[in-house]
Image (cartoon, grey):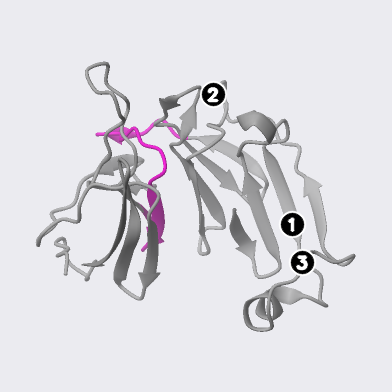
Amino acid sequence: MCLSDPETAILIGGEGANQQPCKDALWKLEIGENLGLKAACFKGWGPCTDNDFWSPVDLPPPGSLPLCPCGHTATYDQETKRIYVFGGMKEGKCCSTLCILDTAIWKWLLVTAKGKVPTLAYHSATIYHKELFIFGGNLPKMASLESRACSNMLYVFNPEYEIWYQPIVEGEKPLPRFGHSATLLRNKLVIFGGQRTSMYLNDVHILDLGESGTAPFL
């Protein structure tokens, strides 16, 4: 789920009962004036009220590729009003699909990107300077491994040129992980926690994105 404006949240994909893919892949939650985002954040938790409306959004799928139902990310770019839906898992396999939902015209765009395209699930995704930053996540399962390996690589997607690249990163990398959080604080990307195989992590790493081509981990 991600915001598309201060009073609207968009839910994309996911699984329902018995881990079955949801039939309606795209939902919109419009938050009424009586609750509002500030009330939800600062005045305590509360259920949806009569002023809050869930509604399915009926859009044709992006191309012939269905969205991965779980483990994907949906990241909103406030400047372009686009939601980037990347990766995830479908039928036990990791995906590398990147789709863009343009909320200005409510239309799906399927991206055929160049460069080294990552194949990941349960990663993190963050928008910075109109680029999509992907960190960590589950890697495709190899037949020689009993458990699925995870990544500590950083990938960046540039939508202007529709290309994936890996920036030069200084400093000691965090351990490989999935299921972690990534939060942008000005020009710093804060990575916290996650899981590595059966081990849960509680460490914090800060990636200084800076203004140049290098980005050191702190």
Say the numbered circle drawn on residue 65: 2
Classed neighbour count for the residue bearing mark 3: other residues with Cα under 10 Å, few (<14), some (14–19), many (≥20) = many
Labels 1 & 3 near each other (Cβ < 8 A)? yes
State how far apart marks 2 and 1 are (Cα).
25 Å
The answer to if 19 sits in the magenta stretch is: no
Q: Is 125 left, or right, of 110 in this rendering?
A: left
Classed neighbour count for the residue bearing mark 2: other residues with Cα under 10 Å, few (<14), some (14–19), many (≥20) = few
The quadrant the C terminus occupies is bottom left
Residue at the spot of label 3 = 31
Q: Where's residue 15, x and y in %?
A: 62, 36
Q: Where's residue 180, x and y in %?
A: 37, 54
Under circle 3, the secondary element is: loop
Q: Is 198 left, or right, of 49 in this rendering?
A: left
Q: Where's residue 96, x and y in %?
A: 39, 31
Say the numbered circle drawn on residue 122: none
Identified at 22% across, 71% down, the residue is: 210
The answer to if 130 sits in the magenta stretch is: yes
Labels 2 & 1 near each other (Cβ < 8 A)? no
24 to 65, vertically: above or below: below
200 to 163, vertically: above or below: below
Part of the protein shown in magenta: 111-132
Disc 2 marks which amino acid?
Leu
Disc 1 marks which amino acid?
Leu
Q: Is 213 left, or right, of 118 in this rendering?
A: left
Of all residues, the one furthest to the bottom in this rendering is 43
Residue at the spot of label 1 = 29
Q: Quadrant of residue 104 in the image?
A: bottom right
Disc 3 marks which amino acid?
Ile
Q: Where's residue 72, x and y in %?
A: 48, 41
Under circle 1, the secondary element is: strand
218 to 26, vertically: above or below: below
